[in-house]
């Protein structure tokens, strides 16, 4: 586990904020008819124009700049040339390296009208991320974060919490210790220290927690074909209250200003 200095945390906030700004660009552009490949190109250009590198490209052979996970795709969806349509839910997960430091976070967007069931899944998943973040304080344990997320999604709302994929430490590498599962027991796991930076990322299914991976070796889908939602924040552990390094407010402002996106959830 690598804890950062205050100066390093400040640099990581810049990296995380660049991801947020990139996702805000996505929020401006999203509408039925465009493709996730278009989003991939847009994001890569925006990141490079800001003197950073899209970090997912070629990570363990990943062949794109962003992960674009639509409807029953949980994470690691390949951008493609299929037009998005009204009623789709789209998670865009993006990573950058800026001045040697990683930012990595994700946001799920709703295109137009969807059922109340889908809205509730999006709302509850986002809420669970903040419930996890509330536990990211010094002397708490990873299991406290995990429990809080599982409690809100699985126990309170009956959703499926993905077991195969977890959050992680973040720094000069995309994945550092500790792993941060979205399920677990209170008071267990690694003890959190000041200035540990974590990517907390609930991946929550409307139905079964079970998943399968496409033949491409990456695309992870729900077993039952029901939708899944993914939100991710970069968070710095502090004594009383975690510091969120990524910034959803700029994404949410762009999302609200785009009439093609549904923010009424
Ligand atoms: N947020 C995801 C993760 O932390 C994205 C990684 S996609 C990959 O694992 F392409 F970089 F693998
Ligand atoms: Co991540």
Image (spheres, rainbow, N blue to C red):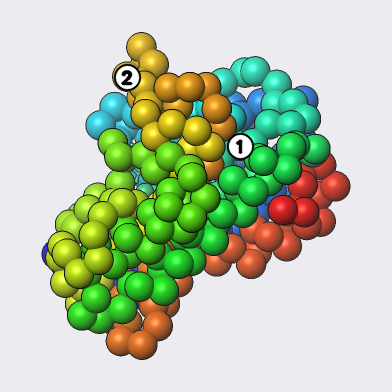
Between residues 13 and 243, which one lies in front from this camera angle? 243
- x then y, percent, for residue 195: 27, 77
- Note whether residue 119 is visible: yes
Q: Image quadrant of residue 237? A: bottom left
Name the element at disc 1: strand
Instruction: Residue at 20% x, 69% y: name it.
Output: 187
Q: Dot 1, crowdedness within 10 Å: few (<14), some or many (≥20)?
A: many
Horizontal side of 4 relative to 80 (left or right) equals left
Horizontal side of 158 relative to 193 (left or right) equals right
- Note whether residue 54 is visible: no
Horizontal side of 253 relative to 220 (left or right) equals right
Name the element at disc 2: loop
Name the N-terminal-most of marks 1 and 2.
1
Task: Give the CA distance from mark 1 to mark 2.
Answer: 20 Å
Q: Residue furthest bottom?
A: 240
- x then y, percent, for residue 204: 46, 43
Instruction: Residue at 30% x, 39% y: name it.
Output: 163
Q: Do the residues labelled 1 and 2 touch (CB within 8 Å)?
A: no
Q: Image quadrant of residue 123? A: bottom right
Between residues 116 and 241, which one lies in front from this camera angle? 116
Q: Residue furthest top?
A: 215
- x then y, percent, for residue 149: 40, 58
Instruction: Residue at 43% x, 48% y: name it.
Output: 154
Instruction: Residue at 25% x, 50% y: name it.
Output: 175
- x then y, percent, for residue 74: 46, 34
* Residue that label 1 marks: 90
Relative to residue 176, is residue 89 depicted above or below? above
Relative to residue 73, is residue 14 depicted above or below? below
Relative to residue 166, is residue 33 depicted above or below? above
How many numbered marks are there?
2
Between residues 171 and 117, which one lies in front from this camera angle? 117
* Residue that label 2 marks: 217
């Amino acid at each position: 586990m690598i804890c950062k200095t205050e100066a390093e945390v400040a640099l990581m906030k810049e990296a995380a904020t660049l991801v947020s700004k990139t996702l805000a660009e996505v929020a401006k552009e999203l509408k039925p008819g465009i493709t996730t490949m278009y989003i991939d190109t847009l994001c890569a250009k925006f990141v490079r124009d800001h003197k950073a590198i899209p970090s997912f490209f070629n990570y363990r052979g990943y062949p794109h700049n962003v992960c674009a996970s639509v409807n029953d795709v949980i994470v690691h969806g390949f951008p493609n040339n299929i037009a998005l349509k009204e009623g789709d839910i789209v998670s865009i997960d993006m990573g950058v390296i800026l001045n040697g430091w990683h930012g990595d976070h994700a946001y799920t967007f709703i295109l137009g009208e969807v059922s109340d069931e889908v809205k509730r899944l999006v709302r509850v998943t986002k809420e669970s991320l903040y419930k996890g973040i509330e536990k990211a304080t010094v002397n708490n344990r990873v299991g406290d974060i995990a429990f809080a997320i599982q409690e809100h999604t699985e126990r309170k709302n009956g959703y499926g919490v993905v077991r195969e994929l977890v959050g992680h430490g973040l720094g000069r590498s995309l994945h550092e210790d500790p792993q941060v599962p979205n399920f677990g027991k209170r008071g267990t796991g690694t003890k959190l220290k000041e200035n540990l930076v974590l990517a907390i990322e609930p991946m929550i299914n409307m139905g079964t927690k079970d998943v399968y991976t496409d033949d491409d070796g990456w695309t992870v889908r729900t077993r039952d074909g029901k939708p899944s939602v993914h939100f991710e924040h970069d968070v710095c552990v502090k004594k009383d209250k975690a510091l969120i390094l990524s910034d959803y407010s700029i994404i949410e402002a762009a999302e609200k200003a785009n009439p093609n996106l549904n923010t009424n959830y």
